Amino acid sequence: MDIACLLEEERATVEEALDRFLPAEGEYPARIHEAIRYSTLAGGKRLRPIIALVATRALGHDAGRIIKSACALEYVHSCSLVLDDLPSMDDAEYRRGRPTTHRVFGVATGILAADALLMHAFKLVADNGVESDADGPRIAGAIRELATAVGSFGMVGGQHVDLEVAGRGTIDPETLEYILSRKTGALFVVSARIGGVLLGASEEDLGSLSIYARNLGLAYQIVDDLLDVEGDPDVIGKDVGKDAGKNTFVTVHGVEAARETARALVHEAKSALDRLDATTAQLREIADYCLTRSL
């Protein structure tokens, strides 16, 4: 199976589950549930839950056993997109080819929808742990890892530092790496690990997956920065050129250095899989896709 077929097959599985685990359309209070569904079911690559499913399968487990946790990762990602698009953040007009959530439902409802998605994500991980017969420490470990990836040591911290340094001119490479590794990389890492944490993978295998995902997340964000400069908005489905005045890998290091660094990071990601006692072909193909994608 080539990478395009793999991603489409896994994406279809995730899409069906995302819909199934969300509050039903029209369920009271209807407006907030409409906003939640609008935010989450607008399409997208679904790469984070796909990484969770593929990594779990690589470890020798049935990926269906962690489908709720995979969906939880996408709910967290959707939450972050709603917040990133707000007027106080990126003030974006379009996301995935249609108006952003706050433009359709208002800022207040958009914030509440993001809050609800985040809480729903933690509920799904807890439910998943119970249903997969994970013991208490494994369930707590999965929830702890997701919470750390989201909070001030993860996505929130990265976003805060990004906002804090905005308008100060070019920042140092260490601060830039801090921002990228938290805003994007942290959720990639927990995506690769969460199935193994719930189902009892070894620390060695989890460590290899962490290295893989950390490098992959950075490469993915660098390619995102390149697409903001060179991408087609009709293909990407969102505004481009929004990062021109911001500190991104491209604005700090330049286009050619960004391309070279992304290639090196993907190489490091795949090298980490050499230490994994698992079948890693699909994880390697996902790494190559992240480097060469056009949207």
Image: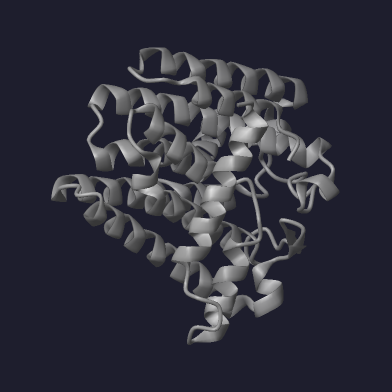
Q: Residue 128, percent across and down?
A: 30, 54
Q: Residue at x 75, y 61 (%)?
A: 94
Residue 198 spot, x, y in % from top left? 26, 43
Q: Quadrant of residue 95?
A: bottom right
Q: In the figure, residue 127 lies in which quadrant?
A: bottom left
Placement of 138 over or under 171, stated as above or below: below
Instruction: Name the residue: 36% across, 20% down.
Output: 278
Is residue 281 among what the camera can see? yes
Which residue is located at x 34 percent, y 28 percent? 59
In which quadrant will I find the N terminus? top right
Does residue 193 lie above or below 89 as drawn?
A: above
Quarter of the picture containing the C terminus is top right
Q: Is residue 152 visible?
A: no
Dividing the picture into quarters, in which one does residue 58 lie? Answer: top left
Q: Going by the picture, which residue comes out furthest to the left?
A: 136
Q: Is residue 63 above or below residue 38?
A: above
Q: Residue at x 70, y 45 (%)?
A: 246
Q: Position of residue 283 (x, y in %)?
A: 50, 26
| Residue 262: % across, % down | 63, 23
Image position of 250 (left or right of 107): right
Q: Is residue 194 left or right of residue 83?
A: left
